[in-house]
Amino acid sequence: MTMKRELLTASALLLIVLGLPGAVFAYQAARVAVPGVRVVQIVGSAPAQGGWLPDSIRVYRGERIRLRIAASDVVHGLAVPGLDLEVEEILPGHVAEVEFTADKVGRFAFACTRWCGADHWRMRGVIEVVDPSNPGALAQAPAAHPPYSQLKLDLDAPRPPVTLPSSRPSAARGNALTPVLPKELSDRSWLRTHSPQDAFEVLRSSASTPGLSDDDLWDVVAAVWLDAAGPSTIARGAELYARDCAACHGESGRADGPAGRSLPGRAALYPGEKRGPVDFTDASRLFSASDALLQGKAFRGGMGTGMPEWGSLYSQEDLEAVVSYLRSFAFDYGRK
Ligand code: HEC
Ligand SMILES: [Cu+2]
């Protein structure tokens, strides 16, 4: 017993003797500039006050960079998805730091991740990593070929009409019907490139679903969509949606977010169409669009409608996740 206590005291002493100078050195190391590390200061303010300053940062490949980020007004967050960097919280009056090695050449968009005012989504900037042996050449972003451009989809074309269900299609009811599915509906790539209306039509003309009403078939379509996305993708999409989309499209997808109200919306493209964001519970619109098309809209943005582009910030996986989540506004996936 005493033996053990003595050992504990001795090791505590040892920790103090060794640990104290270590702590002091660490403190000093944090205060003097570390050779080989370039410090870049950024100050964030809500977009109406100027956004990020600077919003364009140029570094050389191979440099070790320390971002020192301050907030001048309210809480901001900063993410550089292409460099896998994120600072979740930048409190006014504090300095947040993050360090990285600029190991790949390119243009990497960054954005605020905290709701900081009506124009929050405009709070963006870019870090350009240039090749030190050819600094004059503009860094080339790796070309993105999202599915919609490979498929040559016209994102703004009028859509075919939808056979409207009488209520929100329920995945649970669809699963309970246990239909034998035509082969298209168990093919992921078919599902990604076709609309729910296309799937409905395949089911309706299939010999394997006799006796099912149109509403039953819609329930089956909801079940198929839920199954193809999977719960973890939808959960990831829900996080992205809450962070980046709900401000305009609304928490329940009904286009009633505070930042969306005064936007031109589709009226900017076609006179007579609705102003403001798209209502994701609107089956007559959402069921005639494929996931690839909706991902394309989110990738490219809305050509003067007020819908931001997300292609510079989102990976293809992010786009898939957020679109699989926004399907749950028109399909009942069993959430509250
Ligand atoms: C600043 C407000 C705003 C934000 C933030 C916003 N949107 Fe939009 N969104 C709009 C507006 C306005 C439209 C209508 C214009 C259009 O359809 O081209 C729209 C349309 C869309 C459409 C087209 C739907 C259709 O049927 O064609 C999709 C998909 C979409 N948004 C997805 C998203 C996603 C995903 C996010 C978050 C990552 C997001 N939006 C964030 C304003 C916004
Ligand atoms: Cu912000």
Image: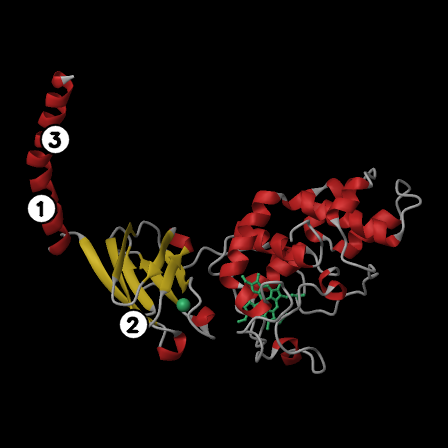
Would you call the spot at circle 1 few (<14 residues within 10 Å), some (14-19), or many (20 or more)? few
Judging depth in this view, the residue of 335 and 70 nearest the camera is 335
Q: Quadrant of residue 300?
A: bottom right
Residue hosting label 2: 72
Query: Looking at mark 1, is its residue's CB closer than 8 Å to ligand 2?
Result: no
Q: Quadrant of residue 50?
A: bottom left
- Secondary structure of the residue carrying tag 2 is loop
Mark 3 or 2 closer to N-term?
Answer: 3
- Left or right placement of residue 61 versus residue 215 in this view: left
Mark 3 or 1 closer to N-term?
Answer: 3
Residue at image position (62%, 76%) is 276
Ligand number 1: quarter of image: bottom right
Residue hosting label 3: 12
The reply to whether residue 135 is visible in this rendering is no
Marks 3 & 2, CB-CB < 8 Å contact: no
Judging depth in this view, the residue of 47 and 312 nearest the camera is 47
Give the position of the N terminus as an image quadrant. Answer: top left
Query: Looking at mark 2, is its residue's CB closer than 8 Å to ligand 2?
Result: no
Query: Given the image, on which type of amino acid does mark 1 rest?
Result: Val
Residue at image position (71%, 60%) is 289
- Left or right placement of residue 223 versus residue 7 in this view: right
Question: Which of the two discs, 3 and 1, sits closer to the camera?
Answer: 3
In the rendered image, the vertical position of residue 138 relative to residue 63, given as above or below? below
Query: Looking at mark 3, is its residue's CB closer than 8 Å to ligand 2?
Result: no
Residue 24's disc is 1
